[in-house]
Amino acid sequence: MTKIAFLVMLLVTILACLLPAVPAQAQAARTFVSAAGSDSNNCTNVATPCRHFAAAYAATAANGEIDVLDPANYGSLIITGPVSIEGHGWASITPAAYSAAFIIRANAGDKINIIGVVLDGTGIEYTNGIEFYSGGSLTVRDSIIRNFVDCGILFAPNNSSQLFVSKTLISDNGYIGISIQSAGPGTVTGVLDHVQIENNASDGLNANTGLTGTQAINITVTDSVSAHNKTRGIAVDSYGPFPVSIMVRNSTIANNTFQGLVADITDATILITRSTITGNSTAWDTFAGGVVASYGDNNIDGNTSAPAEPSNPLTYK
């Protein structure tokens, strides 16, 4: 009997090895989070939502969507692949110290969409609202990003990437409202549309290549506001042979402590049209070969230092 039992057990083992493995639970194209949810749920329908973004993200397929069902703090999230987060104006996040509400380290070409969230750093030390280090694009819409000790958005991709921000308030951060940094090869492009950047402790919007940057940066700002920031409203800094350019159209740059606009060092360019620059210490300025160029149709008035329209006049084509 012992020999027979052994042979039976051996046969069972061999068959188990030959059978295909049972697949893990499939990820869903759409998942849900709720204040009443549990991270032990499957997150895949409104009756079984998760409690935090991290659990829902783990259950979400690539290019899937996480939907927020009601108001709550849903916790920080590290994003490594394409996803859409639909906060519906209810989702809030306060990260831990030395972290960010969202940290994005995705693959080239991955699209990250963050919509309808309230990110509030509450003054916790060394925090950013959103940190983006790699991926194809980041879209932020209908959101509030405020009270972080460092930046509201830190966009420093190590590859060619795109940034889109619209209908969003970025305010009261301890450093720069939106910081766009060159951190790898390729080109960074972006559009800010109907964005309010206010009361940040340094620049409102800063785009720069840094000392070792190897990316060109090309940003368009339209129908937006950069106001009451403690240094500069919009600043472009180029420290290498890679151009950094910002086009400003139909926007207001007001009441910033230093310059409204500044282009620093050769290959740094700001083009401005149909905009208002008022209440700043200096309306606009350039250093070491930087260029601020105008289409000659701006309202530049009420600044402490009030130069006329920038030189290098441009014409519509």
Image (cartoon, rainbow, N blue to C red):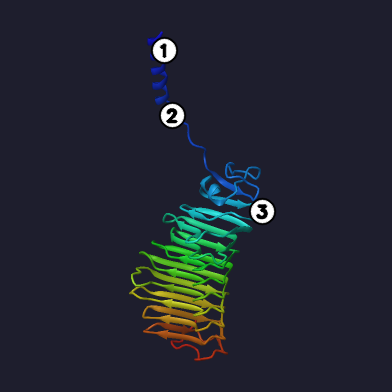
Q: Indicate which label's residue lies in the foreground, 1 or 3.
A: 1
Of the two numbered discs 1 and 2 in the rendering, the one whose residue sits closer to the viewer: 1
State the residue at coordinates (63%, 42%).
48
Residue 42 lies, with reference to residue 113, above or below; the image says: above
Q: Check disc 3 and report the residue beneath it.
A: 70
- The N terminus appears in which quarter of the rendering? top left
Image location (x, y in percent) of residue 296: 51, 87
User: Few, some or many C-alpha atoms within 10 Å of disc 2 (few <14, some 14-19, many ≥20)?
Assistant: few
**Residue type, mark 2 in image:** Pro
Which numbered marker is on residue 20?
2
Three-letter code, disc 1: Ala
Vertical position of residue 317 compared to residue 104: above or below = below
Label 3 SS: loop
| Image marks 1 and 2: residues in contact by CB distance under 8 Å | no
Instruction: Determine whether the residue tagged by mark 1 lies in a helix, strand or loop.
Output: helix
Q: Amino acid at mark 3?
A: Asp
Asked if residue 303 shows in the view, the reply is yes
